[in-house]
Image (spheres, grey):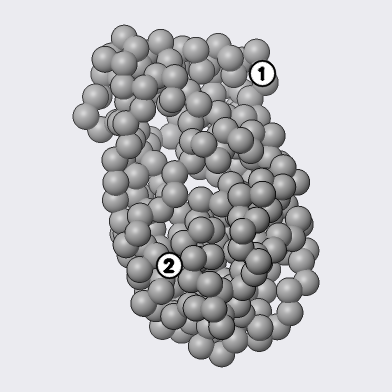
């Protein structure tokens, strides 16, 4: 589903479910980041929009000094508790674009499925100013695509969206497509406009299988789904769950993870 701006607040209302249901990222993605910019106990890093900390641990495990910038109060509290054993970890509860973090101070700034909430010009210019010369910005995200192997189920779910999701948001159905290499390239090239160099990008893939109950829980972590009025949302989610049970009881999600790297 496309991002609907202004719904950032929704995630903090389901912080525990978000942490449970949203996936982390594959080890190969982090290896590419750390090959691009070595990070160790002498490094300083900032994570933009940490959420439930799905991308936080692999960076903390390098021993670096990491500051998480997270606007949700519940998420911030969870992050402090979850990573309480890391003395070099801290959390700032605020929007990234409203936070003073210093200039020419950081070796790595990264954002996992969060940077799209930040206005482009403000975000890239702020990251560039924060980084030391030679420092890196890593932007990555996960793009789930609904079950390719069960077209009958997908068609029925499309009809359910037509009945509940699209009327609520005053939208018409948009064709679902998998995230492509061309989209990753275009996203990577944005950084060039703001002075970054040594632009790189890559795609990573995986599959996840959910029961009807699990998939409905996953839907409950998407901002545009959380925003649907509660009574409508209950009927919508129930219909999706019933459809999955009628078609074998499970739904497979095909994930494409994109990583864009840029250097100051």
Q: What is the number of callouts on the image?
A: 2
Can you give x and y, in whole percent of width and height, for residue 167 in the image?
57, 21
Residue 228 percent location from the top left of the image:
63, 25
Compared across the picture, whether 162 is left or right of 246 comes to: right
How packed mark 1 is, by other alpha carbons closer than 10 Å (few <14, some 14-19, many 20 or more), is: few
In the image, taking residue 91 as reference, residue 167 lies left or right, namely left
Q: Residues within 10 Å of mark 2 (few under 14, many from 20)?
A: many
Element class at badge 2:
strand
Using residue 132 as the reference point, say whether residue 218 is left or right of it: left
Q: Nearer the viewer, residue 132 or 126?
A: 132
Which residue is situated farthest in the front direction here? Answer: 85
Q: Is residue 209 above or below residue 65?
A: above
Disc assigned to residue 260: 2
Residue 193 in view = no
- What residue is drawn where x is 55% and y is 44%? 3
In the image, what residue occupies the spot 32% across and 62% down?
Answer: 28
- The picture places residue 22, in percent across and down from the top left corner, at 49, 41
Residue 136 image point, x, y percent: 50, 78
The first of marks 2 and 1 along the sequence is: 1
Relative horizontal placement of residue 97, taking residue 24 as reference (left or right): right
Along the line of sight, the residue nearer the viewer: 88 or 211: 88
> Cβ–Cβ below 8 Å for labels 2 and 1?
no
The residue that appears at 31% across and 16% down in the rendered structure is: 249
At mark 1, the secondary structure is: helix
* Residue drawn at x 41%, y 71% as measured from the top left: 33
Label annotation for residue 230: 1
**Can you tell which mark lies on residue 101?**
none
Distance from the alpha carbon under mark 2 to that under mark 1: 37 Å
């Amino acid at each position: 589903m496309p991002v609907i701006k202004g719904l950032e607040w929704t995630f903090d209302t389901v912080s525990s479910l978000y942490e449970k249901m949203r996936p982390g990222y594959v080890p190969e993605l982090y290896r590419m980041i750390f090959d691009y910019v070595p990070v160790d106990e002498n490094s300083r890093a900032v994570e933009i929009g940490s959420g439930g900390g799905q991308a936080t641990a692999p960076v903390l495990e390098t021993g670096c000094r990491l500051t998480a910038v997270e606007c949700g109060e519940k998420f911030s509290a969870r992050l402090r508790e979850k990573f309480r054993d890391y003395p070099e970890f801290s959390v700032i509860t605020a929007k990234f674009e409203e936070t003073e973090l210093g200039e020419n101070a950081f070796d790595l700034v990264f954002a996992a499925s969060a940077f799209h909430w930040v206005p482009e010009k403000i975000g890239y210019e702020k990251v560039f100013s924060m980084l030391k010369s030679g420092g890196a910005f890593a932007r990555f995200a996960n793009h789930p695509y609904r079950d390719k192997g069960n077209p009958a189920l997908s068609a029925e779910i499309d009809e359910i969206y037509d009945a509940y999701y699209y009327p609520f948001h005053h939208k018409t159905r948009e064709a679902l497509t998998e995230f492509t290499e061309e989209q990753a390239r275009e996203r990577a090239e944005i950084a060039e406009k703001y002075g970054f160099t040594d632009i790189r990008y890559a795609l990573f893939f995986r599959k996840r299988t959910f029961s009807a109950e699990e998939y409905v829980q996953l839907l409950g972590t998407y901002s545009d789904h959380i925003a649907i009025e509660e009574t409508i949302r209950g009927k919508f989610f129930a219909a999706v769950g019933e459809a999955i049970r009628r078609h074998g009881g499970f739904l497979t999600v095909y994930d494409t993870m994109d990583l864009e790297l840029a250097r100051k």
